[in-house]
Image (spheres, helix red, strand yellow):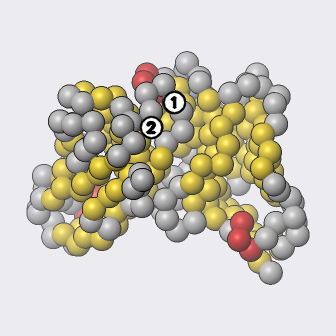
């Protein structure tokens, strides 16, 4: 069965800190790895990674995939209180390319 | 463009009652799915559909039924609600062959 494991499960930092969120996966028929941000409502899409070693970047957020070691990281630099959220990692694979989610990382950024 | 619309947003049920969570999308997406989210558990797939007339089970299908008579609608039915079904439910859809899911706003269900 496909499995997605995120670490840490929760993290508390101060504004301005840099954080790294981890996601490891085991999947058959891998197609892509996705990151979502969830702030007390529906998850919103951040990144999709399909190729190993290519960094995706959006402002202070960036992500990279290692298909050989089966993991991805999400980096957030110069964190702000608005970055406080649950960050979800999901892999698309298996039959019908269903999205399987990890349990998420709860990030709290204190002023 | 409304995207994915879920109703109701909130519902309280008594054990044994039945209800249907509605999901509609106006993006002509072939793939639709239902997830439940519980504290510390992430999102778990209940049922999904790859097109009208086709449904399949996800990770946690027990206690839930679905049907897909049209491309637009994918209702989730609870035939006899149990307290273990207290959760937040998300409907999500995507284009056929795509990876990115678009989520509805969620429906918070409490079963007493």
Kindly give the residue lying farthest to the bottom in the view shown.
A111
- In the displayed structure, A105 sits above or below B14; it is above
| Coordinates of residue A91 in the picture (x, y in percent) | 58, 34
Q: Which residue is mark 1?
A: B98
Q: Residue at x 48, y 47 (%)?
A: B102
Q: Residue at x 49, y 54 (%)?
A: B41
Q: Residue at x 18, y 69 (%)?
A: B13
- For the residue labelled by badge 2, is the local secondary structure a helix, a strand or a loop? strand
| Coordinates of residue A50 in the picture (x, y in percent) | 68, 27
Pick the residue in front: A109 or A2. A109
Work out how far the residue at label 1 is from the one at label 2, CA to CA, in angstroms: 6 Å
Chain bearing tag 1 is B
Dot 2: few (<14), some (14–19), or many (≥20) neighbours within 10 Å?
many
* Quarter of the rendering containing residue B59: top left
- For the residue labelled by badge 1, is the local secondary structure a helix, a strand or a loop? loop
Residue B94 image label: 2
The answer to whether mark 1 and mark 2 are in CB contact below 8 A is yes
* Quarter of the rendering containing residue A33: top right
Residue A108 appears in the picture as rendered: no
Residue A27 image label: none
């Amino acid at each position: 069965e496909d499995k997605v494991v995120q670490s840490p499960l929760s993290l508390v930092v101060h504004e301005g800190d840099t954080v790294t969120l981890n996601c490891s996966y085991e999947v058959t028929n891998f197609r892509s790895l996705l990151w979502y941000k969830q702030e007390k409502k529906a998850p919103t899409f951040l990144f999709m990674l399909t190729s190993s070693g290519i960094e995706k970047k959006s402002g202070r957020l960036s992500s990279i995939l290692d298909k050989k070691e089966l993991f991805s990281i999400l980096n957030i630099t110069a964190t702000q209180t608005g970055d406080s959220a649950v960050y979800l990692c999901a892999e698309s694979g298996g039959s019908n390319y269903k999205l399987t989610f990890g349990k998420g990382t709860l990030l709290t950024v204190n002023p | 463009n409304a995207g994915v619309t879920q109703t109701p947003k909130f519902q309280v049920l008594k054990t044994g009652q039945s209800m249907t969570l509605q999901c509609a999308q106006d993006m002509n997406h072939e793939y639709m799915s239902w997830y439940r989210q519980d504290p510390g558990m992430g999102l778990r797939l209940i049922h999904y559909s790859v097109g009208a007339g086709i449904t399949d089970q996800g990770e946690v299908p027990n206690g839930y039924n679905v049907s897909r008579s049209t491309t637009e609608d994918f209702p989730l039915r609870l035939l006899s609600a149990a307290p273990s079904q207290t959760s937040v439910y998300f409907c999500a859809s995507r284009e056929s062959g795509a990876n990115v899911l678009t989520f509805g706003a969620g429906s918070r269900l409490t079963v007493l």
